Amino acid sequence: MVLSIKDNNTVVQPDICVICDSEKLTERGCTGAPELIVEILSPGNAKKELKEKFELYEENGVLEYWIISLSDQSVIVYRLNENGRYIGSKPFVEGENVSSGVIQGFEITVAEIFAA
C-alpha cells in the first residue's frame, strides 16, 4: 500500500486492510487511505505498530485502525474523530464482540479472532 505523506510516498504492508473505494487500487496496490487497517502486535514490532504506523495512518485519514495483541489476546479499536485524531476504545477481551464503525454489519467476537 502506498500512503502519501506530504510530498513523499511511504510504503507500508498492513496485516489486513479493507479498501472500499476501487479507484484507490492500482497495479502497485492501494494509493491513499483504506477505510480499515488491522495490525497484529508481536514482540518485535510493537513500537512500529503503536507509534510509527499509528501516526502514519492517523495523518493519512485511515478511518479505523485495529491493533490486535497476541500476548494478552485483546483488540483495541481506534477511530478518527471529526478533528482527524484517533480516539481509542477500551481493550476488548474474550467474551466481548468487536464491531466496525466503517464497515456496516461487521462484528466479530474476540474469541473468533484468536481461534486458530
Image (cartoon, grey):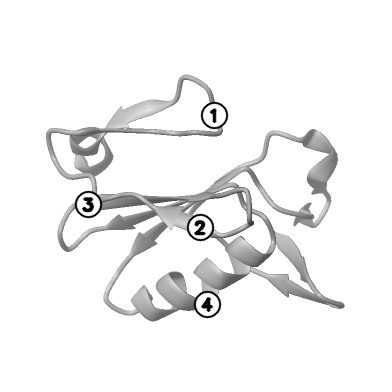
**Disc sitting over residue 86 in the figure:** 2
Q: Nearer the viewer, mark 2 or mark 4?
A: 2
**Number of callouts in the render?**
4
Q: Nearer the viewer, mark 2 or mark 3?
A: 2
Q: Are marks 2 and 4 in contact (CB under 8 Å)?
A: no
| Residue 43 image position (x, y, % from top left) | 27, 76
For label 1, the residue is 103
| Residue 13 image position (x, y, % from top left) | 58, 63
For label 3, the residue is 74
Mark 1 or 2 closer to N-term? 2
**3D distance between C-alphas at marks 2 and 4:** 14 Å
**Picture layout, residue 114 above or below residue 109:** below
Mark 1 or 3 closer to N-term? 3
For label 4, the residue is 52
Drawn side of residue 59 relative to residue 77, left or right: right
Q: Are marks 2 and 3 in contact (CB under 8 Å)?
A: no
State the residue at coordinates (51%, 57%). 86
| Mark 3 neighbour density, 10 Å: few (under 14) some (14–19) many (20 or more) | some
**3D distance between C-alphas at marks 2 and 3:** 18 Å
| Residue 50 image position (x, y, % from top left) | 41, 71
Mark 2 or 3 closer to N-term? 3
State the residue at coordinates (59%, 47%). 63
**3D distance between C-alphas at marks 1 and 2:** 17 Å
**3D distance between C-alphas at marks 4 and 3:** 20 Å
